[in-house]
Amino acid sequence: MAINVLIIEDNPVARTFLRRVVQESFSDPLNITEVGTLEDAREQVQLHQGRDANRPDEAFKLILADLELPDGNGLELLAELRQYPATKVVTTLYSDDDHLFPALQCGADGYLLKEDRFEVLVEELQRIVRGQPPLSPAIARRLLSHFRPASPNTSGFASLDSGFGGLGGMFGAQTSRPSPLDASAATDFEGLTPRESEVLTYLSKGFTIKEIAKLMGIKWFTVNDHIKSIYKKLNVSSRAEAAVLASKQGLV
């Protein structure tokens, strides 16, 4: 019997990319449904009767959800589907704490970065079959670095390999606040290119990656590359930290 998959992504290019990832990840027959809004996603979930015990085979078994959608935040849907019998995986461009932890707290079973190579995403999705948390390598490293200061004993991470249930217990008591900004962080604004400075200005003013791409007349993945370079040069890991530094430099 075919596996029902729901992909929630408003960018047509990214949606096609994620469909290819799913198709390559599983040898089983697949029924893939693609939507671009929260409203359409809710409608499809209801149509598939995921909560109907008499029709369990029609429920979605895998849901890939973007966080930023035209009619709302993907976190809303994750919270609504907390009890839904599916593996729910966030697919996003954001690797910072203030996106990662709220997503896991809202019921995400995994967190994948769309900027990762095709082969990496396929490998991570295939791990679902083995009952392991589908996390991009960069996200796995963030989780380890987040908990290591408080738990130097590495045995405390055993639950990472024990399936999705362990994730929920690990993050239930965590807050969604970003890590404090290190006052000694490198702030080499002179090292930013003119394009990176422009992206940082828009980013600090709250524009989304898609909005920045439209304003600058470039592709969204190019904006994402600029953001990654900015984070590296400024030694920050989130939009909030970058915005603080930008404000101090008078860019906002």
Image (cartoon, rainbow, N blue to C red):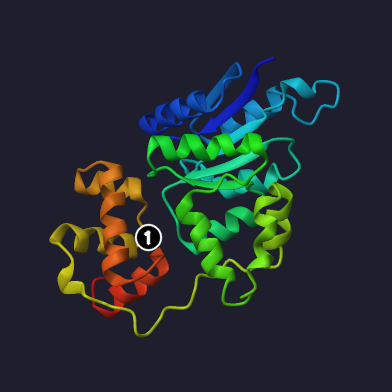
Position of residue 107 relative to residue 188, above or below, is above
Residue at mark 1: 206
Position of residue 173 relative to residue 26, above or below, is below
Please identify the quadrant where the N terminus is shown. Answer: top right
Q: Nearer the viewer, residue 149 or 93?
A: 149
Q: Residue furthest right?
A: 54
Residue drawn at 82 percent across, 27 percent down: 52
Q: Nearer the viewer, residue 16 or 147?
A: 147
Position of residue 235 relative to residue 30, above or below, is below
Image location (x, y in percent) of residue 199: 25, 58
Q: Nearer the viewer, residue 150 or 81?
A: 150
Position of residue 117 relative to residue 238, above or below, is above
Image location (x, y in percent) of residue 66: 50, 42
Location of residue 173 (image quadrant): bottom right
Image location (x, y in percent) of residue 28: 61, 19
Residue 204 in view here: yes
Residue 38 in view here: no
Residue drawn at 20 percent across, 48 percent down: 216
Residue drawn at 68 percent across, 66 percent down: 155
- Tell me the element at label 1: loop
Q: Is residue 212 left or right of residue 73?
A: left
Location of residue 57 (image quadrant): top right
Please identify the quadrant where the C terminus is shown. Answer: bottom left
**Mark 1 packing: few (<14 Cα in 10 Å), some, or many (20+)?**
few
Image location (x, y in percent) of residue 148: 57, 72
Kind of residue indicated by mark 1: Gly
Q: Residue furthest bottom?
A: 183
Residue drawn at 79 percent across, 31 percent down: 51
Q: Nearer the viewer, residue 90 or 69?
A: 90
